[in-house]
Each structure stands twice: as structure tokens, then as C-alpha cells.
Image (cartoon, rainbow, N blue to C red):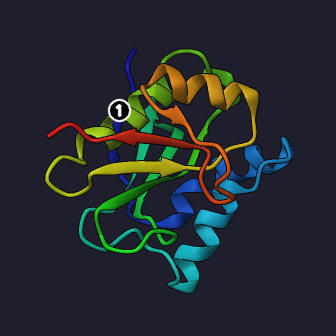
């Protein structure tokens, strides 16, 4: 069954996912929660969002879209805090989340950027049309938005 995607309403919705990620040495979900609570990043500026994937009444994935803080101007988006529960990986949920983010970009952003250091994530993003970037300390992959 394909999960339903919906906007995140409260960072506490991610408690279980954050705990799982932390147990695997990943802190991105916890950072999303912390920044939301502190008010430093609520994904609430024009064009921004956080989507959650819900399957069998459980949140099994999360992915955010921000205006890229490392780029001048407002035409660059940044994929943030993608995490999919280990129990449902390789079932297309990560792709579903990122593709939903990509679909929000036309008319708002001209490109999406992100940073990852994982070979698995590199392959994942390349499969979704992202191209590797060399020599940029804050960006490893870029995707050009087609108008």
C-alpha cells in the first residue's frame, strides 16, 4: 500500500521516527524537531514545506523543502531532513517524498540543492535526476527545475 503524504503539523508527530533515526546514528529528524521548536526553521516561508509519509497510521518518512540558506536570492530550494523508516526502505517512499518536493518547485524555484556524504544517498538522488556537484562545501547534488 502506498503511503499518504501530508504536511507536518507538529514536530511531536516525529518522535518515534526521530528515536529510530537516532538509534541508527542519524540526527536529521531530531534536528528538524529542534529547529522547529526553537523557531529557527519551521518550513513556513513561501514555497517551503515538510511532508510526512503515513502508512497504516504510522509516520514512516519525512522530507523538507526550504529556501536554500546558502544561496543568494530566493530561487533555490534545498531538500532537507529526508528520512525513511528502516522497516519500509526500498519500497519507493523516499522517492515519493522527494518527487512530491520536486513537483512543488515550478514557479517557485529554479533549482534544488542538497548535501549528503552517503554513497547510497548519492545513488538515490542521482536516480531522481540530481546531478553531483564538485568543490562546493555546502552542496553535493543539484536538480534543475523544468518550467
Considering the numbered disc 1 on the image, is that residue within a helix, a strand or a loop?
helix
Residue marked by disc 1: 99
Q: Quadrant of residue 82?
A: top right
Front-lying residue, 143 or 97: 143
**Please, is residue 81 above or below residue 37 in the view?**
above
Q: Tell me where residue 59 appears, x and y as whole percent.
A: 51, 41
Could you say which is closer to the camera, residue 146 or residue 32?
146
Quadrant for residue 117, please give it.
Answer: top right
- Residue 110 left/right relative to 66: left
Residue at 65 percent of width and 43 percent of height: 134
Reply above or below: 54 against 119: below
Residue at the spot x=69%, y=58% of the render?
Answer: 137
Front-most of 58 and 74?
Answer: 74
Instruction: Please provide percent x and percent y for residue 1.
Output: 40, 14
Neighbor class of circle 1 (other Cα within 10 Å; few <14, some 14-19, many 20+) is: few
Q: In the displayed structure, does residue 76 sit left or right of residue 22?
A: left
Residue 30, quarter of the rendered image:
bottom right
Left/right placement of residue 127 relative to residue 72 reads right
Q: Position of residue 42 (x, y in %)?
A: 44, 73
Residue 81, above or below 43 = above
Q: Which residue is drawn at 71% across and 25% down?
A: 120
Whole-percent x, y for residue 126 in the image: 53, 25
Q: How many badges with numbers are in the image?
A: 1
Relative to 60, is 63 above or below?
A: below
Quarter of the picture containing the C terminus is: top left
Amino acid at each position: 500500500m502506498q503511503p499518504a503524504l501530508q504536511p507536518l503539523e507538529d514536530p511531536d508527530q516525529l518522535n518515534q521516527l526521530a528515536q529510530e533515526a537516532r538509534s541508527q546514528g542519524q540526527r536529521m529528524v531530531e534536528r528538524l524537531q529542534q529547529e522547529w521548536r526553537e523557531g529557527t526553521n519551521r518550513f513556513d516561508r513561501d514555497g517551503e514545506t515538510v511532508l510526512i509519509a503515513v502508512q497504516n497510521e504510522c509516520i514512516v518518512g519525512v522530507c523538507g523543502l526550504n529556501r536554500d540558506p546558502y544561496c543568494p536570492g530566493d530561487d533555490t530550494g534545498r531538500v532537507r531532513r529526508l528520512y525513511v523508516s528502516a522497516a519500509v526502505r526500498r519500497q519507493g517512499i523516499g522517492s515519493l517524498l522527494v518527487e512530491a518536493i520536486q513537483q512543488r518547485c515550478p514557479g517557485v524555484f529554479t533549482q534544488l540543492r542538497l548535501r549528503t556524504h552517503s554513497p547510497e544517498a548519492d545513488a538515490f538522488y542521482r536516480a531522481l535526476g540530481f546531478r553531483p556537484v564538485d568543490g562546493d562545501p555546502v552542496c553535493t547534488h543539484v536538480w534543475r527545475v523544468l518550467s
